[in-house]
Amino acid sequence: MRYPIPANAQEVLDLQHQPIDEEVVAAAIAGVIRIARAQGRTLEDLSAELLAEDGVLDKAQRRWLQELVTHAWENLP
């Protein structure tokens, strides 16, 4: 992977300055998971945030993202 896994929220936000590709998205997801775990949050906590209504993603997109994050959570060390 070209991008290191972000260790804090600022590093996740800094990824927005990179051209969007699958590696940037993967790094962002891994960073969010790393940060959530460091804060003692659970997969259920993160899933609830992902599934909450927002103006960016529709329900199907939020569900797809939640499934992707669940898979990553279960497979990242």
Image (cartoon, helix red, strand yellow):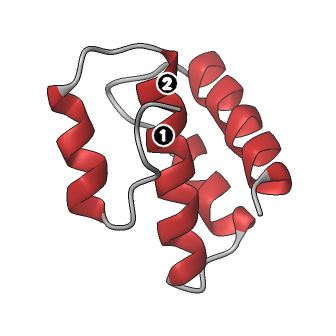
> Could you classify mark 2 by the number of other residues whose Cα lies within 10 Å: few (under 14), some (14-19), or many (20 or more)?
some
Circles 2 and 1, Cβ within 8 Å, touching? The answer is yes
Q: Is residue 63 left or right of residue 14?
A: right
> Could you classify mark 1 by the number of other residues whose Cα lies within 10 Å: few (under 14), some (14-19), or many (20 or more)?
some
Where residue 72 appears, x then y in whole percent?
74, 44
Q: Secondary structure at mark 2?
A: helix
> Tag 2: residue type?
Glu
Q: Is residue 33 left or right of residue 2?
A: right
How far is the residue under mark 2 from the one under mark 1? 6 Å
Q: Nearer the viewer, residue 34 or 49?
A: 34
Q: Which residue is mark 1?
A: 27
Q: Is residue 65 left or right of residue 26?
A: right
Q: Nearer the viewer, residue 63 or 1?
A: 1
Q: Is residue 18 left or right of residue 68?
A: left
Q: Which residue is mark 2?
A: 23
The residue that appears at 69% across and 73% down in the rendered structure is 42
Image: 36 above or below 22: below
Q: Nearer the viewer, residue 12 or 57?
A: 12
The residue that appears at 56% across and 49% down in the rendered structure is 30
The residue that appears at 22% across and 24% down in the rendered structure is 18
Where residue 19 appears, x then y in whole percent?
25, 14
